[in-house]
Image: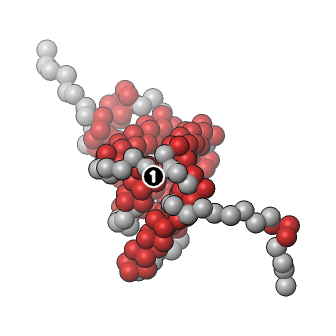
């Protein structure tokens, strides 16, 4: 009796990410992932019973990687005050590469179309926002900084707009300035219109 071949599930998920980046999440197939990973279809189906389960596994791993990446950056910041938001800003210091953008764009489409997957993103964002507010002496400024940072990332990750490096670096410094700002509320009903 021969030895069973052990299938590296990380390699299968890496292959699935490449397929998503190349073909889109909507066009992801078990066959395409198996071919990309160099395994048979049954090997992919053994751990991921359906295309939906495979997409969920890709997204779950993306959340795990993102959380670990940000935690590692936060550990490098000695001052506990504003550690979460400053870690997020530092993490965004380099623009995303083309391969990452392709996967992010296609996984965003999957998140938008699936209530369960969208729920995972909502939970992740709620945890991040709560942590930012809990660790900041100026929760309003830190939250505005996070919203500005996420807006920048949204434009870049979805390939809507890219700033030249000099402008991007300046924008990140300005977002960092927002962290300690103490915003004032101005009622929208009192705004003047021309």
Q: Where is residue 125 in the image (x, y as percent from the top left)?
A: 55, 46
Image position of 168 with respect to 3: above or below:
below
From the viewer's perspective, is 189 left or right of 110?
Answer: right
In the displayed structure image, the side of residue 167 where residue 126 appears, left or right? right
Q: Is residue 1 left or right of residue 135?
A: left
On the image, numbered disc 1 is attached to which residue?
82
Q: Does 121 sit above or below residue 193?
A: above
The residue sitting at 44% across, 38% down in the picture is: 60
Residue placed at 55% from the left, 54% from the top?
Answer: 138
Observer able to see residue 142: yes
Residue 134: % across, % down: 53, 43
- The local secondary structure at tag 1 comes to loop
How many dots with numbers? Answer: 1
Assess disc 1: are there few (<14), some (14-19) or many (≥20) residues with their C-alpha within 10 Å of its C-alpha: many
The residue lying toward the viewer, choosing from 124 and 15, is: 124
Q: Quadrant of the N terminus?
A: top left
């Amino acid at each position: 009796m021969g030895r069973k071949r052990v299938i590296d599930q990380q390699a299968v998920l890496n292959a699935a990410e490449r397929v998503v980046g190349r073909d889109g999440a909507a066009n992801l197939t078990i066959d395409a992932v198996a071919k990309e990973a160099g395994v048979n279809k049954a090997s992919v189906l053994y751990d991921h019973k359906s295309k939906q389960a495979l997409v969920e596994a890709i997204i779950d791993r993306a959340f795990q990687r993102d959380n670990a990446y940000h935690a590692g950056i936060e550990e490098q910041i000695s001052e506990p005050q504003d550690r979460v938001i400053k870690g997020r800003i530092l993490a965004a210091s380099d623009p995303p590469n083309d391969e990452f953008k392709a996967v992010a764009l296609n996984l965003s489409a999957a998140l938008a179309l699936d209530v369960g997957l969208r729920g995972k993103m909502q939970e992740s964002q709620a945890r991040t926002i709560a942590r930012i507010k809990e660790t900041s002496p100026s929760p309003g400024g830190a939250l505005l900084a996070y919203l500005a940072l996420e807006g920048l990332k949204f434009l870049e990750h979805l390939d809507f707009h890219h700033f030249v490096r000099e402008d991007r670096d300046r924008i990140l410094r300005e977002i960092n300035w927002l962290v300690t700002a103490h915003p004032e509320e101005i009622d929208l009903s009192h705004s003047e219109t021309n």
